[in-house]
Image (spheres, rainbow, N blue to C red):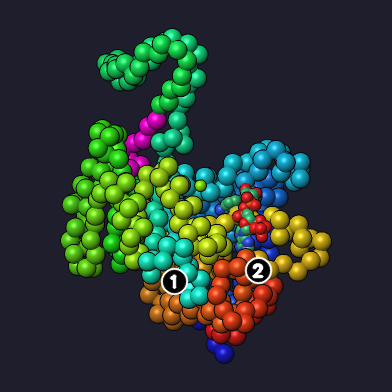
Amino acid sequence: MSRIEMKTPLVEMDGDEMTRIIWKEIKDIVILPFVDLKTEYFDLGLPNRDKTEDKVTIDAANRTKELGVAVKCATITPNAQRMTEYNLHSMWKSPNGTIRAILDGTVFRSPILVNGIKPFVSCWEKPITIARHAYGDVYRNTEFLVDGPAKADLVVTYPDGRQEKQTIFEYKGGGVLQGQYNTDASITAFAKSCFQYSLDTKQDLWFATKDTISKIYDRRFKDIFESVYKNEYEAKFADAGITYFYTLIDDAVARVMRSKGGFVWALKNYDGDVMSDMLASACGSLAMMTSVLVSPDGKYEYEAAHGTVTRHYYRYLKGEQTSTNPMATLFAWSGALRKRAQLDGLQDLENFAARLEKSAVSTIESGIITGDLDSLLAHPDKKVVNTSDFLAQVASNL
Ligand code: NAP
Ligand code: MG
């Protein structure tokens, strides 16, 4: 059988532990037999990040800016325990943080829905995609513990020395204080990524903040979204038959719970953090959640939403068989191949990406599953298999 051709290589970012094992199995079992795969390989596994002083992460992100599409394996973000375990020279930063800082964008997460695994919210028929702004607000805050009577002011000093000042609060006793910020540039980039993603996937876009209470801060988000929409996307949305809809965050939550799904829900950083965990658990499993970082200039980095599944890896190292779910990592590959195919005009490759996803979903629907889905899937004669047997069944369906 002749293999499907590619034109431009994908940026391939390898990772750590169990997902590194799964990474190779996915390539060997369900991709390489069918596709003449072209990638530029960057080893983001922790030993190589340490060896290159994390230069490999920066190189991979910069190459993604040039080639346009990357696929990333889960990676360890080192902590004190990992410093000893891997004998590291330094506590390297989170690769995802480094890549996001270089590509600048928004993280889109959506569940993989299969028949037989019902979301806990029974009216959700189609996946809901959460678009989380990944910059600023409470994640870059400045906080104080105020330990007695005090006056707190907010002061802004411009380069010409001009100042604006407001009293926040006069404390009569102890308390807490917090400062937050965001920038027009980052909010605009967030808005553009959301409109572009909705257009690419032909889904309505919802956006929600608390602008009735936060009349300047959250209002700024609302206004920037509105102006990006009017200036760049209104006509394109009309052509695609999709809509943009703004509402208050509490109203949005109520509507989401009553909706059929099938739209993109843009959220500020904190709201996105909380709501994506809500969405993931309502849909069953982290291993059934896809994730893609989209930059405002249309660069894409596909990955799984889960980590390196350390507990399974330690069992694997002891020679035990593991039944780790490869779906999210497999969908990272199919997502990247599909995007590459669309950019390069390769219909065969685009069809392959769709068939790969369908084969994976129908494997689960036929009752062949990994351990994490055992309690979730309703099926009369389901069978829990190990990761490579699961992938072999996907290949056989293909
Ligand atoms: P995790 O790797 O997501 O795993 C947490 C638990 O969730 C696992 O022990 C397993 O539960 C279950 N699970 C997750 N993915 C699964 C899959 N594909 N199949 C079956 N079960 C799955 O999170 P973690 O253990 O907190 O973090 C491990 C490492 O991953 C850390 O070093 C962290 O820095 C890194 N991390 C990386 C990323 C990323 O690169 N995007 C994201 C998050 C975390 P059971 O053990 O109960 O089966
Ligand atoms: Mg969270």
Coordinates of residue 42 in the picture (x, y in percent):
60, 57
CB at mark 2 closer than 8 A to ligand 1? yes
Crowding at dot 2, Cα within 10 Å, few <14 / some 14-19 / many 20+, comes out as some
Of 225 and 38, the residue lying toward us: 225
Q: Examine the rendered structure and indicate whether residue 89 appears above or below residue 177.
A: below
Bounds of the magenta segment:
180-188
Horizontal side of 190 relative to 320 (left or right) equals left
The mark that comes first in sequence, 2 or 1, is: 1
**CA distance for labels 2 and 1:** 28 Å
Q: Residue at 43% across / 80% down in the picture?
A: 351
Residue 29 visible in the shown view: no
Coordinates of residue 327 in the picture (x, y in percent):
56, 68
Horizontal side of 367 relative to 190 (left or right) equals right
- Amino acid on which the number 1 mark rests in the picture: Arg
- Amino acid on which the number 2 mark rests in the picture: Gly
> Mark 2–mark 1 contact, CB under 8 Å?
no
Quadrant in the picture for residue 343: bottom left
> Ligand 1 is found in which quarter of the picture?
bottom right
Quadrant in the picture for residue 66: bottom left
Q: Residue at 53% across / 79% down in the picture?
A: 365
Residue 184 belongs to the span the image colors magenta: yes
The residue labelled by disc 2 is: 371
Horizontal side of 126 relative to 40 (left or right) equals left
The residue labelled by disc 1 is: 338
- Of the two numbered discs 2 and 1 in the rendering, the one whose residue sits closer to the viewer: 2
